[in-house]
Each structure stands twice: as structure tokens, then as C-alpha cells.
Image (cartoon, helix red, strand yellow):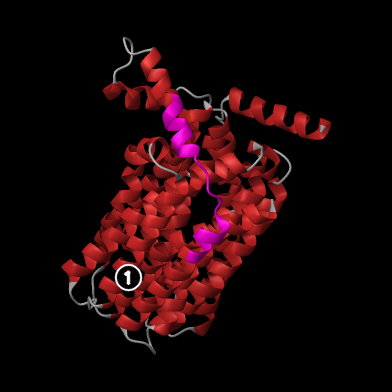
Amino acid sequence: MFMNVVFLTCLYFIQGLPYGLQSRFLPVYFRSHGMSLTEISLFKLLLTPWMLKAFWAPFVDKYGTKKSWLGWSMVGLIFTCLTGACTPPQNIVPLAGVLFLFNLLTSTQDIAVDGIAIHVLSESELGYGNIAQVVGYKLGSIFGGGVLTWLSDYMEWSSLLFSLAVAYVISLMNVAVLVPQTDDGKKESEEKDSSEEKNAEKVTKKAWILQHYTEIFQSPGTLWMIGFVLLYKLGEQGALNMLPMFLIDKGIPASTVGFWTGVVGQVLSIFGSIVGGAAVSGTSVTISFLQNVCAFRLVPMLFTTLVIFSWVDSSQICFVLAIISMCLMLLVSGIVTTATFTLMMQCSKRAPSHVQASHYTTLATVEVVGKLLFSVSLGSVTDAIGYENVFILFLVLTTLVISFLQSCPEELIHHQEEVSVKDKSE
């Protein structure tokens, strides 16, 4: 199990690099250079491949091996970083192309890594596996966001992107050494091809994708899970995206904001992820656990809203209170995220084995879609109604999650109870 956790952590780390670059580093960089909130939010559209990856997930399942997909995408990322190093951030269009390639390659990686995780982790190891997933991703986000934001005051753009290329070279070597050589993709492809030959009159080659998705959406608890992952992060994500912009607008230096939001805050989020993963490891995630944690998340959300409403310019106390509330929110966020991703994997394990990777990818894609669409509109909404009103919206959205958890289908709850009984008997 230890080696599984190690190589999964490494793989999710490299996936977090572009997210940190786009969600933490570039917004602060652009805002400090006078770009509007609306223009900054539109850059989130470059994350579109993460919204669409479920459409090519069946092909990653059907053709080739997971390791080959990882290796070639890693090579592509190295060349993308080198191209980005030659592209000054002032050249918006070329920069957008580089970021789009980042997202296309890493979203494809994510499909392969999720497929590996589902197959190598047992039911009792899902909590530890999701610690690797969430913590690895957040470590990558820290490096790509907080560290780069801090280094931006001391290093040129080209040097920052070259350092990312070096990180991907190291990651490629880790893939070669740590990721086991499997032929799961080929075996699944051969099994599906054999099945298609036996049922040639019923299923054409064009219809296999439709059948694939039908099995995904008919799996127990899937539709409720989709609704939950669409909603559960909106209020929290909005607050964590807008608070750094608010601090920049209040005259706080970009390097200070980057350090606290991108480094210290993310470290606390990682700690929360470890706590959440440890809490659910060896047992099933219960809806009551998520309800309690999501209810507690209202505390830092309310605290942050009060700080926004009572802000006094040039007040160090207000800045300290804003940082404290953000750090507490990130701590709770880590717990919620790990528990939710574990629940997603449990839901995917209920799907037929040959669609489990695509099932989990679909859930993860929906999770990204919810956050991304909301983030794209966030700048325009904030410009229109102001920081005070938008934080009230975040508070309402966070409250709605608790009510949604109460509608969890019985089939998903019963599965959790069955897993608990099975674990205790073993």
C-alpha cells in the first residue's frame, strides 16, 4: 500500500502544477498589473479540457496502457513549459495557447491516474488513496501557485517556466520507476472487442460509447453524486478566489497575498486533507460525517463575510482576521474534499468494472465543471454587485450543501453500511 500511495502522490502533484499556476499565480500577477476581475475570470475558460475530459475518457480506457498515456503526456508538458518560457505573459494570446495545452495534457493524465487508483486501491485503502490524491494535488498547487507567486518578485517569467519543465522531467522519471507496467488498457480493449464480436448484431462499433455512458449513469447513486459534486464547493471556492483579489484591491502587496493564500493556507489545507483521509480510512464515508464538517464550514465562511463588511483601510487587524478566517476555511476545506473524493470512489466501485475509470472521471469532471463555470462568472458578478454582496451569496451556497446531503439516496447509504460491516468482519 505504501508504494501505491507514493506514486499516486507524485502523479497528482504534477497535475496540481497548472492549476496552481492559473488559480493562484496568474490572477495575482494580472491584478497587480491592472487587469480587471472580469478579464481575469475569463482566463478560467482555458480550463475547458477539464470540463470535457469525460468525452475522451472511454478512449483512454479502451486503447493503450495507463503508463503510456502518462509518459507521452509528460513529454508534451515538458515541451509546453519550454514554449511557455519563451512566451512573455504580456502576450495574452500565445500565453492562452500554452495554458490550454497545459490543461489538455494534464486532464488526460488525470483520467489515466484515476483509473490506476481505482484498480490498485482496495475499499479500505480509499481514504489513504484520496490523501495521496488531494495532498499531492495541493502540493502541486502550492508549487505552481504560492511558490511561483513568491518567486515572481525575484525571478523572471522564463526562469519560472523553466523550473516547471525541470519538475516535469523529474516526474517523468518517477513515472518510469514507480508506476507499474500494466496492460489493463489492452486487456479491457480485448475484452470489449470480444464482447462486440459476440454481439455484433446488437451493438455496432459506433454504439459502444453510448452503451459505456449508459452503464455509467445507471449505476446506483450516480445522479445524486453528480448533483452533490456540482454544488459542494461553490461557496467555498468563490470565497477563496475572491478574498485574495479583495486584499490586492485594499493595497496588500502581491507577494504577501501569495505567501499567505498560496503557501501557508495551502499547507493548512493539506493538513485538513490528511485529517479527513485518516478519519475515513478503513471505514466507509458516512453522510452524517460530511454533514457535520460542512456545517462547521459555515463558521469561517461567516467570519470572512463579517471581515469583508467591517474592513477598515490600512488596518493590520482586519488583514490578520482575514488571513485567520481564510486559513480556517482551507483547513475545513481539506477535510471536506478528501471525504467527498473518497465517497466518489466508493460510488464508482459500485459501477461495472469495465467503466469504473470513466465513471470516476465523469464525477471528477462534473466537480470541475461546477467550480469552473462559477469561477468564470465570478469576476463579472463581483464587479456588478461588490464584494460584500457576493460573499453573502457564498454563504447561502455553503448552507445549501447541508440541505442537499439530507437527500442522499438510500442505496448509497446502505452500501456504506454494508462496507462497514464487511470491514469489521475482516
Q: Position of residue 284 (x, y in %)?
A: 69, 38
The overriding secondary structure of the stretch rendered in magenta is: helix
Q: Nearer the viewer, residue 372 or 389?
A: 372
Residue occupying the point 56% across, 41% down: 118
Name the element at disc 1: helix
The answer to if 177 sits in the magenta stretch is yes
Q: Nearer the viewer, residue 242 or 312?
A: 242
**Hey, which quadrant is residue 153 in on the image?**
bottom left
Residue 181 in the image: above or below residue 351: below
Residue occupying the point 63% across, 59% down: 272
Residue 1 in the image: above or below residue 218: below
Residue 234 in the image: above or below residue 13: above
| Amino acid on which the number 1 mark rests in the picture | Cys
Residue occupying the point 33% across, 40% down: 56
Q: What residue is shown with label 1?
A: 81
Residue occupying the point 46% across, 82% down: 256
Disc 1 residue crowd, few under 14, some 14–19, many 20+, Cα 10 Å = many
Q: Position of residue 81 (x, y in %)?
A: 32, 70
**Hey, which quadrant is residue 325 in on the image?**
bottom right
Left or right of 149? Residue 115 is right
The answer to if 139 sits in the magenta stretch is no
Q: Position of residue 236 (x, y in %)?
A: 48, 55
Which contiguous range is marked in magenta? 173-191
